[in-house]
Image (spheres, rainbow, N blue to C red):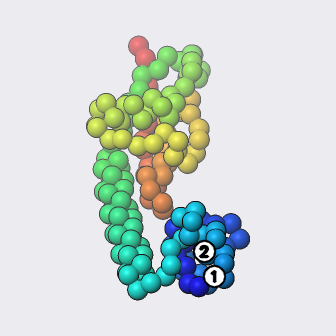
C-alpha cells in the first residue's frame, strides 16, 4: 500500500515522503496514529501544494534576510564602556546587549543565539560579529566600543 507520511517515522521515512508498506502496517499502525495517509490522487495533489507553499515561504524568508543583511552593513553600534589604563575593558559587551541596541535604535530584531562567533566584545575599537539571519545568510554586525568618560 502506498502511504504519504505526515510525520517522521523511525526506520520508515521522513515527513512528506511517499513510501510502500504492507497493508497491515498501514492499517494497524500508520493510519490509526495519524502518521500517514493513503496515497490517493487528491492526497498527492495536497502534498505537492504544501511542498510548493513551503518552498515559496523559504524563498520569501531568505529574501527578507538578504535585505536585512544589506541594511546591517551600514549600521555601526556604539557602546561606551569603562576601561583600565591599558585599554582593557571592565566587563564586556554581550550579544544580548547588541540585540537590545539593534532593537531599540533601529527596530531590527535578530536572534542572540544565532551569533556564529559566540564571543563577547572585550576590547576597545571596532569588532565585527557574524549573525546567521537565515540558512546560508550571514550578516556582519559592526560594534564600536569606546572608552566611557
The answer to whether mark 2 and mark 1 are in CB contact below 8 A is yes
Image spot of residue 101 (x, y percent): 37, 31
Within-10-Å neighbours for mark 2: few <14, some 14–19, many 20+: some
Foreground of the two, 149 or 115: 115
Image spot of residue 54 (x, y percent): 39, 67
Image quadrant where residue 2 sits = bottom right
**Residue 26 shown left or right of residue 100 in the figure:** right
Question: What residue does disc 2 label?
Answer: 27
Image spot of residue 63 (x, y percent): 33, 62
> In the orientation shown, which residue stands out farthest toward the right?
11
Quadrant containing the C terminus in the rendered view: top left
Whether 27 is drawn above or below 63: the answer is below
- Determine the residue positioned at 28% across, 37% down: 106
- Determine the residue positioned at 51% across, 46% down: 114
Whether residue 15 is visible? no
Marks 2 and 1, how far apart at CA: 6 Å
- Determine the residue positioned at 66% across, 82% down: 22
Image quadrant where residue 76 sits = top left
Question: What residue does disc 1 label?
Answer: 23
Callout 1 secondary element: helix
- Determine the residue positioned at 41% across, 43% down: 110
Q: Which mark is residue 138?
A: none
Amino acid at each position: 500500500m502506498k502511504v504519504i507520511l505526515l510525520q517522521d517515522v523511525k526506520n520508515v521515512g521522513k515527513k512528506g515522503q511517499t513510501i510502500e508498506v504492507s497493508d497491515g502496517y498501514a492499517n494497524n499502525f500508520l493510519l490509526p496514529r495519524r502518521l500517514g495517509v493513503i496515497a490517493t490522487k487528491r492526497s498527492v495533489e495536497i502534498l505537492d501544494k504544501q511542498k510548493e507553499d513551503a518552498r515559496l515561504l523559504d524563498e520569501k524568508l531568505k529574501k527578507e534576510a538578504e535585505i536585512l543583511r544589506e541594511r546591517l552593513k551600514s549600521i555601526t553600534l556604539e557602546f561606551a564602556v569603562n576601561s583600565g589604563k591599558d585599554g582593557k575593558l571592565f566587563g564586556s559587551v554581550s550579544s544580548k546587549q547588541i540585540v537590545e541596541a539593534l532593537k531599540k535604535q533601529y527596530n531590527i530584531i535578530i536572534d542572540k543565539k544565532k551569533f556564529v562567533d559566540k564571543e563577547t566584545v572585550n576590547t576597545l575599537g571596532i569588532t565585527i560579529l557574524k549573525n546567521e539571519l537565515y540558512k546560508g545568510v550571514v550578516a556582519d554586525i559592526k560594534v564600536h566600543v569606546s572608552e566611557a568618560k
